[in-house]
Amino acid sequence: MVTCLTALGQDVRYALRVLRQSPLFTAVVVVSLALGIGANTAIFTLVDAILLRWLPVQNPQELVVLARNPSLPTTAASYPDYRYLRDHSRSYAGLIGSWSGGVTSFSLPSESGSSQLVALALVSGNYFEVLGVPPSLGRVFNSADNETPGAHPYVILSHAFWKRVFGGDTGVIGRDILLNGARLQVVGVAREGFTGTSVGVSPDVFAPIIMQRTFWPNDILALTSRNGGWVTIMGRLKRGVSRVQAEAELNLLWQQILENDPEQRAIRSWQKDYSLLNKRLLLAGSSGYSGLRSQTSRPLMILMITSGFVLLIACANVANLLLARSVTRRKEIAVRLAVGGTRSRLIMQMLTESITLSVMGGVGGLAVAWVGVAVLLRFLPIGASAPLELNLSPDARLLAFAFTVTVVTGIAFGLAPAMQASRPDLVQALKSDAAFSRIGRSVRWDLRRTLVSLQVALSLLLLAGAGLLVRTVANLRSLDSGMNREKLLFIDTNIVQTGYQPQFARSFFERLREEVQRLPGVLAASTADVTPFGNSRSRSQVQIEGHRWKANEPRIVEMNAVAPRYFEATGIPIVQGRDFLDSDNVAILPDLPAQPGAQPPDPPGPPRVAIVNEVFARRFFGGQSPIGSRLCMGEHWDPARTYEIVGVAGDARYFNLRQAVEPMVYRPRYRETGYSGGILCIRTGADPKRLIGTIRRRVQEIDRAVTVTETHTMEDNLNRALLPERFVATLGSFFGVVALLLAAVGLYGVMSQAVTKRTREIGIRIALGAESRKVLWLVMRDALTMVAIGAVAGMPAVLTLTRYTESLLFGVKPQDPVTIMASALLLLVVTALAGFLPALRATRVQPIQALRQE
């Protein structure tokens, strides 16, 4: 063991001396490896943080998440459903519930009179207890904090929020804070490092889920109604209980819930929604749950494979450089073998040099990864309610990955050159450089040509994949969204978080809309509940007068509540009938019902009217005009709560550019019990961003408690909607360009060495009268042959592997001939240029100087 360590130390010191003598060679190799290793490490860092890393809780491997069908990662059950499962299941040490939205932001007033937004999470009273997360200060919630609605006005602060806002003051326990206008008492501070069970978001404050009405006072049925789901359920399995046993019990409990449902939910729809009847109901919960995970898992896996190909190309490139370098060291190697050195010892010493280079590249790769992760985070889908929060600190898995990649890379590019260099013809090597060159050239040349062709094949694959993804983004951008995207601005405020009652919120928005409408350059201003490619969505069942429903015909439609001039502001045309009038938008706000769960009384006033889109008209009315027809929102027809259709709006894409437009119903925004929130939609004649400062001042003039929380143009919304596609296309293009450059560098190195070795031959040809163009073609033929072999070898891989990107493509087939041929042409041009430079140098060889070399 001591002898091996001594030999290893000697090899390392010798490797460092040798590499120091060739600084340019060392720099090129280290930079190539740093790019490859850094790209892989950066992407694996996100893969680890989003997909693999366990929650910082007690025994996370025991956690499970209640799942829907395989296409949906987590469920959103009703609160009564959660309570029934919690009270009747016997397979779990505990079941916890949390708001499925993860977190949302609320206003926290400060001593200076201003306010800041804090991310709030609603969790069940047993949340911390079941997860096994003790407090760092005070206490956590208990089961008693989850029984009586509104009777547990307590909050627990996250450790980071406690440090940031309260400076780590231990006297915060027992202090009251104001959230949404409600006074809540701080009872504890969570353990450092715990950020909840939803990956990608980090709550500042945890509150009991039973306090839901405090934060959403208008959502009066959330805690009592079984319709609609907003609670994510996780559980900790009891020791000795398998997931199969827990799923069997869960199936039984779901059947009981459906059979005893007092609200008579449609069992067929729930059986379709949930994986009942012995299908998979539970997923591993050790890594928590996340909507971000479902959006990014496939793109991250594709990029992980792509970066692996880039690293392979870098290895081939470095192997070529080492093979070229071994020629200059042939006498050194021959002498060492001649004086008794063994081949195995020589291979170990050369592998040590390779691994030393790889370690240096790995260190540089960590710097590349650190920058790369920051860039990658900008492309991840991020909601507006809370900033993206990921634990990116290195853990054992990440360090093991980086170490493994570094060592394997060093062996991968160093083994073949070491094996080849350790087998010289000693007699010829010790005689002269020229003799060795002639005799040893063939094997070494074939290996280097093979490596170049491999680089070309992999580069073609990456370029074709990147081309398909770039065309996908272009196709989605050019798709008609049904509205005018230019000069459209959206303004969001924290009015919901201030605790405004609906009637005051309506007055605020109406005044703000009127003042904005009067600003110079504003063409139209309105408000809406749902904006195109925003972060909100509203759906409801619909009943249509006179319509005969077919078997399994979907009855769910999209909903949007809008103020007058909304269609003018967004550029959505009214193709039939009329727009909403101010008289349609009269707000008549009834008192809230006295009994929890009761429907509010129907307010008197002008008749309800609605506008539907063209898809709605075609699906439910065929070729007939829907104007004058009536519809009702909900599961049952209620003559007292019907809407008359007064207009048909053009089809507009609101949520996903890939999907077909769905039926949508527009309602007057303030006609019902009222909305306390809303987004201002502004159409301008010039750059809308110039108005943002003025609008902020107008908001503060109307009410200093209300602030503008987010401003974004239609283009901003569209860019956010295309983040996954842009993420993959941008990184794929970057990797494709890097691969192309590495392949070009590899070809250039091979051809430069070839021209150097054939200098005497070329000089003789020129001396005998060979024309420059023939000498040029003599060299270019070898270069183009390597490129052609690589392209032909890579074509089957392109046609096969691009099919795995089909789910990410839009408007282009995986085997699109135009994209593939364009990629091949680009590869040919760049590599031909790399081969042309050494070939051009060959035409300038002076015969006399070439003949003197021997």
Image (cartoon, rainbow, N blue to C red):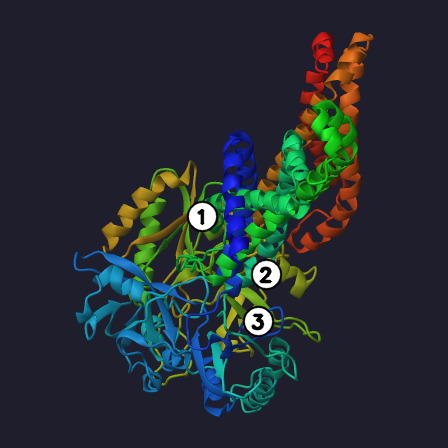
Residue 159, image x and y in percent?
30, 66
What type is the residue that disc 2 sits on?
A: Ile
Q: Position of residue 409 (x, y in %)?
A: 60, 48
Q: Which quadrant of the structure image shows residue 414?
A: top right
Of 838 and 735, nearer the camera is 838
Where is residue 479? Give x, y as percent.
62, 46
Q: CA distance from mark 2 to mark 1?
A: 59 Å
As helix, strand or loop, the secondary structure at mark 2 comes to loop
Q: Nearer the viewer, residue 69 or 785?
A: 785
Which residue does the image show at 48% across and 57% down from the upper left?
399
Name the residue that disc number 1 marks.
370
**Where residue 63 sits in the image (x, y, percent)?**
49, 78
- Which kind of residue does numbered mark 3 sit on? Val
Dot in front, 2 or 3: 3
Q: Which numbered disc, 2 or 3, marks the residue that appears first in the sequence?
A: 3
Nearer the observer, 157 or 27: 27
Q: Nearer the viewer, mark 2 or mark 1?
A: 1
Quadrant of the image for the C terminus? top right
Point 48% across, 81% down: residue: 235
Residue for badge 3: 542
Question: From the viewer's perspective, is residue 280 above or below residue 767?
Answer: below
The amino acid marked with disc number 1 is: Trp
Kindly check if marks 2 and 3 are in contact, taking CB atoms under 8 A apart as contact.
Answer: no
Q: Taking 765 as reference, is 112 left or right?
A: left
Q: Which residue is mark 2?
A: 627
